Image (cartoon, rainbow, N blue to C red):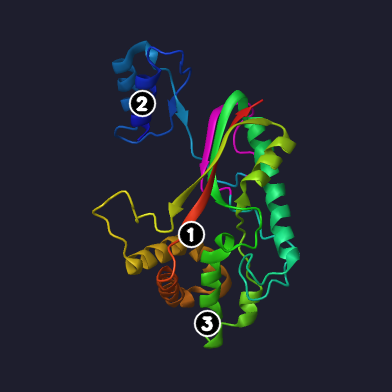
Amino acid sequence: MDSNTHNSIHEHGHGHVLQVEKVFHMTSRVGENSYSHNSALQREKGNDVGPCFIAGMPGSFYGRLFPSKSLDFVHSSYGVHWLSKVPQGINNNKGNIYMGKTSPHNVFEAYLEQFQSDFSLLLRSRADEIKLGGQMILTFIGRSIKDPTTRDCYLVLELLAKCLLNMAAEGLIEEADIDTFNLPHDTHFIEEVKIIVEKEGSFVIDQLETFEVNMDANDNEENKNCGFDKFTCGQNVSRCYRAVLESLLVDHFGQAIIDDLFERYAEFIVEYLSMEKTKNFNIVISMERK
């Protein structure tokens, strides 16, 4: 994949003002992404191709990851809606695992404050690492309107909370365990994002846009050969959220309930899709380092 990126840079940059100064490939494997293949690619493209360094770093992005002024470009996809920790002071969020329609007002305030703190720290950390004029593009889940109590903010996670409550009613888990479980996750309104970027002050916003995608990524409306099937969609969405949330749920509730939980979750999603087909709301922001 790195060599494909390299080729694209060469094709679009050749003959234009754009000039790539440095490109490095961080792999010693045998194959098209290896150092040896990179050397062959440079010989093929000639002097137009410089070294390119591409790195994916483990660790929290709410803090430093790279050396100072070492980066030209940063991209994060579907990570920023995860908070560094569960907000404090939300012990009264009974029967919910996130913000929900029955959550007290202080829960919404706590989630917003945690996001403001985390996102500001992310901006400061990347500002130290990105060169002047460097770019950062972030894509993450958001919400369509300012009011965090609207259904598009919490619907999918509210369905999961209902599954847990049903299991508690059947004696499979303790309701007290649900009351002490909250997800370190938040959805953001586009204006909230804009205000934080402008207040932190390290970046200029180039573009700030929103877009919607189907709840099930496999539900492709542009493909006329791909018909919508609520049962398949329910299974796909359940598997997706299991991949994302399983480790958090296992840590709090144990492994034994997981299969049953996500089978119920798929059924709840199918039931919901029988009444309404919904989309996930997303935010994408492109920024330049001042």
Circle 3 SS class? helix
> Helix or strand or loop: what does disc 1 sit on?
helix
Q: Are marks 2 and 1 in contact (CB under 8 Å)?
A: no
Label for residue 8?
2
The numbered dot on residue 244 is 1
Q: Earlier in the sequence, mark 2 or mark 1?
A: 2
What's the amino acid at mark 2? Ser
Q: Is residue 31 left or right of residue 283?
A: left
Which mark, residue 79? none
Q: Earlier in the sequence, mark 2 or mark 3?
A: 2
Residue designated by label 3: 166
> What range is drawn magenta here?
62-80
Q: Position of residue 169 (x, y in %)?
A: 55, 87
Q: Quadrant of the C terminus?
A: top right
Q: Residue at x 56, y 69 (%)?
A: 158
- Within 10 angstroms of label 2, few (less than 14), some, or many (20 or more) residues? few
Is residue 99 or residue 176 the one in the foreground?
99
Q: CA distance from mark 3 to mark 1?
A: 21 Å
Quarter of image, res 23? top left
Front residue of this view, candidates 180 and 144: 144
Magenta includes 257? Answer: no
In percent of width and height, residue 251 lies at 56, 68
Q: Earlier in the sequence, mark 3 or mark 1?
A: 3
Secondary structure, magenta segment, majority class: loop
Left or right position of 121 against 157: right
Per the model, the C-alpha gap separating discs 2 and 1 is: 32 Å
